[in-house]
Image: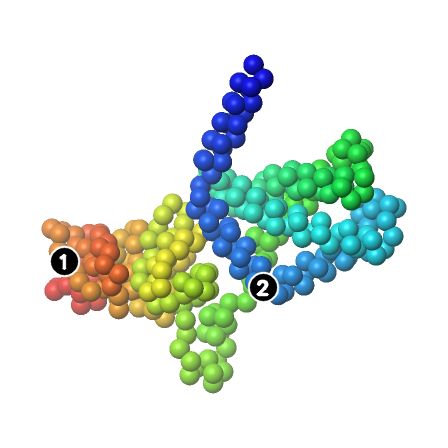
Amino acid sequence: MRDTCALFHLQYVNSMITDVDTRHLQVTLREMQALLRDRRFWIGLAALGIVLGLFGPFDTAGLLRTLPRIAYWLPVTLMTFGTGTVLSCLAAASLRDSGCPDMLAMALGGAAAGVPVTAIVVLFNIAALDMPLTHPMNPTILFSTMVISAIVAVTAETVWPSAMPNSANSAAQDPTPDSLSAPRSPAILTRLPVAVRGPLVSLCATDHYTEITTAKGRTLVLIRLADAIAETAPTPGLRIHRSHWVALDQVTAVRRRDARAEVTLTDGRTLPVSRGAMPEIKEAGLLPR
């Protein structure tokens, strides 16, 4: 009976893991990689660990001296941030797919991530401080971590995008001689891994994501198609379908299909042109009027 229950539990866990949308994980890990390459991230995280070490929350001020306390909080901060960020983003993305508003999804995702983060802290306390699993402080740690994680997730969603430098936008807004003489890159490229950044070919909507194809490859980004199109300037292009945008210089052929048409791109793909987009296709000179 016990073996049967264990097998059922393993199958249930495996089904939960299988049901996770791999696109959410793919995008989250790419964003984490970009964040980990940012020197400011490591400086900020180290500063947070030092501040926590100096103030000694959760009774660590009474358990450890200042230097050992800082040495305790630095690895705890590093370990919990990565776990909390990935899990909160995955939970928030799943909630958004269910129709949950963005801010509420981030808050609930952060709170949910607080549970495994607390588990890491408790295990670290057992190993480093010889603190028993039944320590009366653990429920307080759980509640505080869930609340803090929710606040951090919402704050990051609200503040971080505007705080991050955007080279394409700043170049467009700063009318210095350098920015006037240098060609401006589409802002959407700053959302892509460096290895994929290149001339835009197409944007294709996929659920809540947009598949961005460049001359160097393709990747999924958690952004609406309309918002992605707004970041394609100065690349000339057309929205040929409710789910597709193409760069005009990447179109190699256009063929009529009754009242509609289809375009062939430089990478060999063929995308449909909706009936409503036919006038714009003709206006661009891709089809006879």
Q: Position of residue 168 (x, y in %)?
A: 46, 70
Q: Can you see residue 118? A: no
In the image, is 255 to the left or to the right of 150?
A: left
**How many residues crowd around disc 1 within 10 Å: few (fewer than 14), some, or many (20 or more)?**
some
**Secondary structure type for disc 2:** loop
Q: Which of marks 1 and 2 is in front?
A: 2
- Which of the image's four quarters has the C terminus? bottom left
- Which of the image's four quarters has the N terminus? top right
The structure residue drawn at horizontal position 61% and vertical position 41%, both measured from the top left corner, is 113
Q: Distance between the residues labelled 1 and 2?
A: 46 Å
In the image, farthest residue toward the top:
1
The structure residue drawn at horizontal position 40% and vertical position 58%, both measured from the top left corner, is 228
The image shows residue 201, relative to residue 127, as above or below, that is below
**How many residues crowd around disc 2 within 10 Å: few (fewer than 14), some, or many (20 or more)?**
few
Q: In which quarter of the image is residue 235?
A: bottom left
Q: What residue type is labelled 2?
A: Asp
The structure residue drawn at horizontal position 20% and vertical position 62%, both measured from the top left corner, is 281
Q: Where is residue 160 in the image (x, y as percent from the top left)?
A: 58, 58
In the image, farthest residue toward the front:
3
Q: Position of residue 51 (x, y in %)?
A: 77, 57
Q: Can you see residue 91? A: yes
**Secondary structure type for disc 1:** strand
The image shows residue 120, relative to residue 168, as above or below, that is above
Q: What residue type is labelled 1?
A: Arg
Read off the residue under disc 2.
38
In the image, is 87 to the left or to the right of 232?
A: right
The structure residue drawn at horizontal position 78% and vertical position 31%, both measured from the top left corner, is 134
Please tell me which residue lies in front, 228 or 217: 217
Read off the residue under disc 1.
255
- Residue 246, label in figure: none
Q: Position of residue 78 (x, y in %)?
A: 67, 53
